[in-house]
């Protein structure tokens, strides 16, 4: 990175955080701190909801995922527009009318305290662990590729987030998220057009898409009912719907973004903004990755994008094999490039041999994948730095190698902004839930408004420090990281199930629902431990949700019979 | 309850907005299908 990149990076971050802190320098009362004074407009809500969901990993991993597996991942978001409509119709009026501070307050209002505490506890458990990973995951990639110290990166990013989240509360989070999201959108837009400009002469977006399609990257929608396929239209609108419904309807880190809205209309408009633009945004991020893929069909890509992992292999048999693989990788690249150029030329001239060129390009591409896979295997077996998937490094490596200075700084700012915005939303929600659902409701119910305001700050600070500590020591727990990523889906189903059962059941049935929730959660965890290989994690959302409804129903029959006896 | 009946801007009713979102989503899926068939 050059000095101009550092100026752009720090300038962007300092301006956004400084502006957020200045706008919230005076915090009046608890409503101001937890609900942003109930003054938020739809634009702030919309961008803030989007920013909470889009973590740094979204912008690092998604283009890399498209580079390796194509566009199919966009189907994961197909349940989102429908979920947004359901949340707008059902959840938003309930939360707004009851003037709740947290989503879980609603459960006590409708049922009783223990159901509220169960849902709040499950939220704290999974979000508390996830917050550390939200900081750690991008920090490890940035530090690996930029040579930054991992500990300092985590401490700097984490501390800045903690400072503005603790001092300004929900309003500071939402205001900074709004500007962070704008920087993210502008940065990604610039990156997309710069990649197009970097393609060789005669290769525009149409030719690029033709090449990507020819090599199997343009299978965007798949209507097949094959359960073994990870991303299909059907898994997107079913599993994806349940995931989005639990996330937008019952996850406090999202609910807090919109319950501070000025009116139901403002909240709904903010959510609808996400329902309309989230899928196209993910599509464009994936398309950016596909265009990076097209670029690397004409310019030699590295054997692995995480060069440090390759360099970490000690001298010996494996290192010698890596040297051989590099040579084969370069050879196959040249052959593949010639086939692709022949394919495009023939296609333009309408010649019949275009198909033959494409077959040759596909064979060469398959061979290059085999070479890369072998290199990855060697890294896993021999390197002391096999910390992340190689696809996570694709986009950042491209940015650093091929984009001009200034833009590099802006795109690193995009990644750091995304890390900050999602972490701040999480810490803010963790602090609010601890204060309102546990401290105020159970531990110390008769204090002043000012006391709870200070308590919120203390709890937010506590969760922030915990997240930073977790991030600092996460490298010791490599296997745990994947588990934490899946953790969301393990708990979301149960939490959504508790809410849906609450809509369906009467107040007198709080105990069956509480027991149903606990048993469902235990079952999902056991199921995950026993058959995690066979069941895609997206399905746990549905399984958990249905289990809560079914078990609550069975318990309610059991208790009714006992009462009648 | 008055809040819930509040009319949204531009579209006149919330149901129309929800239909618009669904319509936009269906349009996107059709566009994605066309792109899939055209380029694959």
Image (spheres, coloured by chain):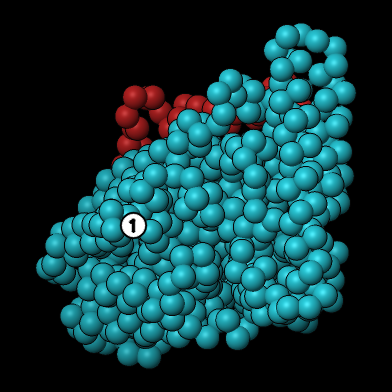
Chain colours: A cyan, B red
The answer to whether A4 appears left or right of A397 in the picture is: left
Q: Is residue A458 visible?
A: yes
Can you give x and y, in whole percent of width and height, for residue B10 in the image? 34, 24
Residue drawn at x 64%, y 71% is A311
Q: On the picture, is A155 further left or further right than A480?
A: left
- Kindly give the residue lying farthest to the top in the view shown: A350
Relative to A362, say whether A89 is above or below: below
Q: Position of residue A468 (x, y in %)?
A: 43, 81
Residue plotted at (41% across, 38% down) = A190
The total number of labels drawn is 1
- Classify B29 as above or below A408: above
Please name the residue that numbered disc 1 is placed on.
A2
Residue A21 drawn at (x, y percent): 19, 65
Frontmost residue, A123 versus A22? A22
Q: Specify the quadrant that holds the C terminus of chain A.
A: bottom right
Residue A512 seen: no
Q: Residue furthest bottom?
A: A443
Q: Name the one closer to the observer, A469 or A248.
A: A469
The chain to which mark 1 is attached is: A
Q: Residue at x 56, y 74 (%)?
A: A126
Q: Is residue A127 above or below residue A17?
A: below
Residue neighbourhood size for the residue with mark 1, other residues' Cα within 10 Å, grouped as few (<14), some (14–19), many (≥20): few
- Quadrant where the N terminus of chain A sits is bottom left
Quarter of the figure with residue A20: bottom left
Provide residue A160's location: percent of width, then percent of height.
Answer: 30, 72
- Residue nearer the viewer, A189 or A458: A189
Task: Identify the residue at horizontal 34%, vertical 75% (top origin).
Answer: A156
Q: What secondary structure is marked by label 1?
A: loop
């Amino acid at each position: 990175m050059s000095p101009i990149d550092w100026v752009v990076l720090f300038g962007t971050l300092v301006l956004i955080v400084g502006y957020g802190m200045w706008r919230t320098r005076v915090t009046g009362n608890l409503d101001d701190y937890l609900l942003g004074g109930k003054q938020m407009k739809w634009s702030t809500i919309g961008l803030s909801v989007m920013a909470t969901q889009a973590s740094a990993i979204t912008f690092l991993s998604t283009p890399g995922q498209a580079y390796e597996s194509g566009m199919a991942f966009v189907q994961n978001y197909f349940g989102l527009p429908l979920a947004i409509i359901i949340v707008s119709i059902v959840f938003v009026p309930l939360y707004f009318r009851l003037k709740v501070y947290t989503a879980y307050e609603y459960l006590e209002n409708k049922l009783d305290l223990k159901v509220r505490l169960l849902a709040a506890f499950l939220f704290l458990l999974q979000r508390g662990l996830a917050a550390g990973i939200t900081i750690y995951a991008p920090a490890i990639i940035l530090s690996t590729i930029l040579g930054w110290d991992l500990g300092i990166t985590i401490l700097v990013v984490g501390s800045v987030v903690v400072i503005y989240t603790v001092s300004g509360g929900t309003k500071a989070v939402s205001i900074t998220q709004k500007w962070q999201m704008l920087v993210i959108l502008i940065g990604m837009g610039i990156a997309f057009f710069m990649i197009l400009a970097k393609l060789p002469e005669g290769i525009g977006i149409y030719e690029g898409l033709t090449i990507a399609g020819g090599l199997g990257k343009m299978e965007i929608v798949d209507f097949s009912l094959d359960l073994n396929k990870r991303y299909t239209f059907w898994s997107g609108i079913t599993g994806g719907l349940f995931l989005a419904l639990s996330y937008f309807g019952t996850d406090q880190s999202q609910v807090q973004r919109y319950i501070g809205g000025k009116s139901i209309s403002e909240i709904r408009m903010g959510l609808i903004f996400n329902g309309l633009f989230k899928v196209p945004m993910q599509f464009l991020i994936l398309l950016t990755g596909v265009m990076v893929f097209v670029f690397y069909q004409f310019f030699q890509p590295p054997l692995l994008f995480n060069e440090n992992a390759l360099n970490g292999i000690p001298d010996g048999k494996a290192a010698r094999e890596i040297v051989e693989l590099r040579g084969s990788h370069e050879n196959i690249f040249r052959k593949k490039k010639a086939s692709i150029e022949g394919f495009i030329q023939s296609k333009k001239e309408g010649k019949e041999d275009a198909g033959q060129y494409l077959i040759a390009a596909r064979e060469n591409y398959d061979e290059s994948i085999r070479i890369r896979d072998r290199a990855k295997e060697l890294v896993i077996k021999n390197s002391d730095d096999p910390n992340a998937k190689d696809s996570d490094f694709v986009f950042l490596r491209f940015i650093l190698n091929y984009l001009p200075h200034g833009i590099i700084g802006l795109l690193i700012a995009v990644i750091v902004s995304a890390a900050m915005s999602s972490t701040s939303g999480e810490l803010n929600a963790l602090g609010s839930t601890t204060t309102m659902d546990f401290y105020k409701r159970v531990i110390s119910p008769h204090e002043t408004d000012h006391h709870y305001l200070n308590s919120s700050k203390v709890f937010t600070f506590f969760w922030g420090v915990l997240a930073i500590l977790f991030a600092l020591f996460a490298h010791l727990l490599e296997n745990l990281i994947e588990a934490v990523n899946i953790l969301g889906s393990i708990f979301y189903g149960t939490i959504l199930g508790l809410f849906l059962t609450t809509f369906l059941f009467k107040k007198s049935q709080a105990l069956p629902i509480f027991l149903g929730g606990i048993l469902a959660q235990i079952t999902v965890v056991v199921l995950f431990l026993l058959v995690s290989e066979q069941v895609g994690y997206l399905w746990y959302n549905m399984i958990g949700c249905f289990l809560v409804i079914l078990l609550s129903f069975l318990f309610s029959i059991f208790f009714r019979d006992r009462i009648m006896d | 309850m008055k809040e819930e009946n509040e009319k949204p801007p531009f579209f006149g009713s919330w149901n129309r907005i929800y239909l618009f979102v669904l319509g936009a989503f269906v349009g996107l899926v059709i566009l994605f299908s066309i792109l899939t068939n055209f380029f694959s």
